[in-house]
Image (spheres, rainbow, N blue to C red):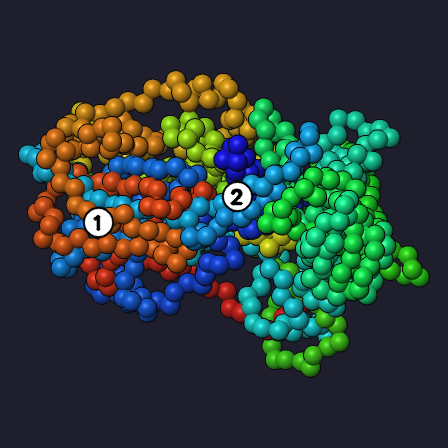
Amino acid sequence: MQSELELSILLDEDRIRRRKVAMSCGPLLMSFLLLTFIVPVAGVGLLQVDRQPKLRRAHKDSNLLLIEDAEDGKETVELLRFVTPYKTPMETVVDITPYSQLIHSLLQAPSVEFYVAIDTWVSNDTRKKLVYISNTSDSCSSVWSSQGNAWNVSLDLVQWPRTILEPIQPRATILLAESFPNPLMDIGQVKAHEGTLMGDLVTLNSGVALGPLATVYPCPSGADTLKKEALLGSYAQEAEQLVLEAKHLDANTSKNITARLEAEYLQDMVSDQMIDAKILTSKGQDLEILLSSNSSKLTKDLPVYLAPGSTVSDQPYISTVWFNMSLPFQPLGYIKEIYNDTHVLMNVTKHHCILSLNSSSLPGLQVPKDKYVIPTATKKLDMVVAVGIASGKKLREDHSNAKESLLLLNASYSDGKLSIKEKKPLGRIDSKALGRSELGETKVCVVQKNTQGHVFSRQFEPNLQVNERAILHLTITGHGWAATSESCGEYCHAIYHLHLNGQNFANVTQWRDDCYLNPGGPAQHGTWYESRNGWCPGSVEPGIYIDVTEHLDKTGRNEFSLNLTVWQNLTHRYALYTDISGFIQNDVAMLAVTANVLLYGSYAVTAVLTAPQAFSKAEAALRDGCSDPEKLKPPKVVHFLSDDFASSDEARKENEEQVIDTCPPSQVPFDFETRAPWYFYNHSKEILPGKPSGAKYLPVIDSRLVQINTRTVTGQVDSLKFQGDWQQLALRFRLMNPEFLEMDRWDRVGSVGVMIPKTLQNVQIRTSETSPTPSSSKYWRMST
């Protein structure tokens, strides 16, 4: 019974983190206080990952562009992106023949160093005891919740022996961009910078680069207070959207919206006004409790609540049952006697089964600092919601839609009365100011909205000869928590606009709506079946290959640019991306991007065109122009795959009945695409690819433990162990259960690749932005 409860708790934690947002002017903001721990989404530890780029010195040596890393003289080159499954093993064999030339260049050294990186944050002890309260019998029992402990990682390099056929391998490699395992690329970030205003001169506390969307707000209490005002504004915007979505308005509409948002956000609003407490003993129907800090404002009949995350209870969800990580924000009981400023007796009025628990199973409690905390917060929230309801009704009358914007609502008291007013901007940043002025009396915050369209640009020189081809290899996965605008980058439907020398040559979507078909999915926990931006839990992401030959200046310098638009649920169109919700909730939307250009000589091109078929994604691009042509056709209108379907009996049946082609392990060339898009193998049941035909498996990393302190592990292969040449090259990658420990229970972003030195033959490396960096300043002019 406990194991089933534990699995359901995991599913619920995932559901809470990943609940999709259907409104972008006032996104449904998650109540993170329902969780007792913050767990990264898809391996992105938002508060713990250093995103500052490494210091690099670039110089040019004849036709070879080199980057010297100031730390260790090496760069990472990703060969394979993956996302771990929810506490289940995974074994894949994936083609990396397109990087044969890169590997050949590395064989000049005594050994080749590979890495596996998983952005996991678990350790040996992540178990937590919770109290399960039945919502039917009101009985209590102890359950365990665990995040898992680690991953066990193994990696082999697979070489197919050279045949009489011309190998389809590039002659040169151009490495354009990589953001994992390096810091991921933040997109659409909104930032607030504190400073002062005198006249029209804004003096910031530190130098920053500002753009035309930088807005100046009065900010007497600093940026943290401004964010709290923005949070109140988001509640109003959510109420506004609920009014717009209502089928009809009646007397109960406003009442229902207010009750819904109270249940959602009241606990958040009072969180900093609550005192933690623990149960000492039980006395009949009473509990003796001890507060964690003194309070001289304790009064009889003050409500006492269960601490967030200390209890779980059944809640129905679609056709399944899942567990809410916290009971509704309702009093467990009330203070009956006050012994002193920290020691009280409370009577239990709800969930009396708490009294039957032993001392090791007792949940935590919380007490408001005084009797005004809950009533004041309730009144404030209701007034904020009323602002949104009124705005929604006005939009309905005008037949208008809401727009995503930053709304600041200031709550203040005058003559003992609470009022809610919108905080208007003072003006916009107009230009830099020369010189400086004495600090003024008015404190301000400058809010810079980064409306993301351009992601990055890179320059390179292909030096293509007659009948040679250039293939772009692009891998993009989106990551971020549910609190970002449009739930980006994990759940937003993005289009990546690809340009060469200023001309748009392709528009790519990496959206995966096939996650529910993952053959290994039913063995997973969590929301493995939900569609995502570029990945599925428990999958490898080989990316897309596109022939760019006809778009190049074949002998001169070229500039590749990656731009971005995101589907907006409010306006039902694609637009530039601004993460207003992420700013309010301290969340970040991010992309993990790898972009490389592979140059194929005429012999390889002839070989692939005369072959009976394409055996890999790169070969498909050489033959047909693109490995995944459907990814070049983004939908004009986005219809997200319904969760109702993804978790339905119909979808599960489709998963079970799908037919996955198999390829004889002795086939030469080996057809990697027969197992697309999952590329799974099971060594315990199948003969490994290439084994019967003499493929050589070179162990790289053998059963290494990956957890919080060892998120990146490396392994070396002696260069002399490589065959002199090969026909095809692949990675056999395995995630297994660590001995005596539990597998990590979450979906973490990961990467497999090689470390490359400062110089390589026929390899161009470009990891810095070619566009000019905006200059920063402390002094700016404001226009009104």
The label nearer to you, 2 versus 1, is 2
> Is 26 situated left or right of 412 in this image?
left
Residue placed most toward the observer, 690 or 280: 280
Q: Quadrant of the C terminus?
A: bottom right
Residue placed most toward the observer, 742 or 784: 742
Residue 550 against residue 433 in the figure, above or below: above
Per the image, label 1 sits on a secondary structure element best described as: strand
Say which residue label 1 marks. Answer: 700
* Mark number displayed over residue 235: none
> Is 149 situated left or right of 364 in this image?
left
- Mark 1 and mark 2 in contact (Cβ < 8 Å)? no
Residue 552 placement (x, y as % from top left): 30, 46
Quarter occupied by residue 300: bottom right
Say which residue label 2 marks. Answer: 145
Q: Amino acid at mark 1?
A: Val
Q: Residue furthest bottom?
A: 438
Q: Residue at x 67, y 64 (%)?
A: 223
Residue 40 against residue 320 in the figure, above or below: below
Q: Residue at x 35, y 42 (%)?
A: 737
Q: Residues within 10 Å of mark 1 (few under 14, many from 20)?
A: many
Residue 246 against residue 196 in the figure, above or below: above
Q: Residues within 10 Å of mark 2 (few under 14, many from 20)?
A: some
> Is 600 situated left or right of 33 in this image?
left
Q: Residue at x 85, y 57 (%)?
A: 299
Q: Is residue 33 visible?
A: no
Label located before the other in sequence (2 or 1): 2
Residue 775 placement (x, y as % from top left): 51, 68
Q: Amino acid at mark 2?
A: Ser
Per the image, label 2 sits on a secondary structure element best described as: strand
Q: Residue at x 63, y 46 (%)?
A: 358
Residue 723 against residue 422 in the figure, above or below: above
